[in-house]
Amino acid sequence: MILEIAQIEIKAGMESAFEAGIARAAEIFRAAAGCRGFDVRRSIEHPQRYRLLIRWDTLEAHTEGFTGSQAWQDYRAIVSPCFAGPPSVEHTARVLKAF
């Protein structure tokens, strides 16, 4: 399983719009092949900063199957007007689950 971590900075005053939009986008991710779910976290110290933690079966499920698809375009159309800049995205693999 691959964990995509997307850090997104939101324009001031658009936090509620982003949160509503990402909630609507849940169905897009639910239908995406290889997507196992996602969490949205908001920074306490920097309230305009969010992190999307998206679980994919494989890296390719995200980078080849989802990114660039119509579903991805639909997702971006919903949330990108709230972005202050391009998201920072990385993919991680678990090396340890302690407890």
Image (tube, rainbow, N blue to C red):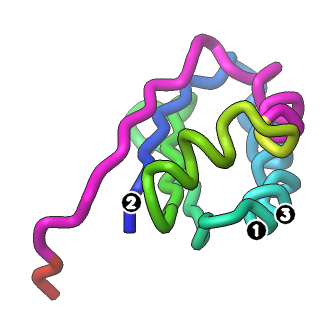
Residue drawn 48% across and 67% down?
57
Please report contact status of discs 3 and 1: CB closer than 8 Å, yes or no.
yes
Q: Residues within 10 Å of mark 1 (few under 14, many from 20)?
A: few
Residue that mark 1 sits on: 30
Residue 50 point in image, percent of width and height: 53, 39
* Quarter holding residue 76: top right
- Quarter holding residue 71: top right
Q: Amino acid at mark 1?
A: Arg
Q: Secondary structure at mark 1?
A: helix
Q: Which residues are magenta?
A: 73-96
Q: Label 3: few (<14), some or many (≥20) within 10 Å?
A: few
Q: Which mark is residue 60?
A: none
Q: Quadrant of residue 90?
A: top left
Is residue 85 found inside the magenta-colored segment of the image?
yes
The label shown at residue 2 is 2
| Residue 67 versus residue 93 in the image, above or below | above
Q: Earlier in the sequence, mark 2 or mark 1?
A: 2
62 displayed left or right of 90:
right
**Identity of the amino acid at label 2?**
Ile
The residue shown at (45%, 25%) is 88
The Cα–Cα distance between marks 3 and 2, rounded to whole angstroms, is 20 Å
Residue named by callout 3: 27
The residue lying at 54 percent from left, 30 percent from top is 8
Residue 16 visible in rendering: no
Q: Is residue 88 left or right of residue 66?
A: left
Element assignment for label 3: helix
- The kind of residue on which mark 3 rests is Glu
Q: Are marks 2 and 1 in contact (CB under 8 Å)?
A: no
Where disc 2 sits, the SS reads strand
Residue with the most extreme bottom position: 99
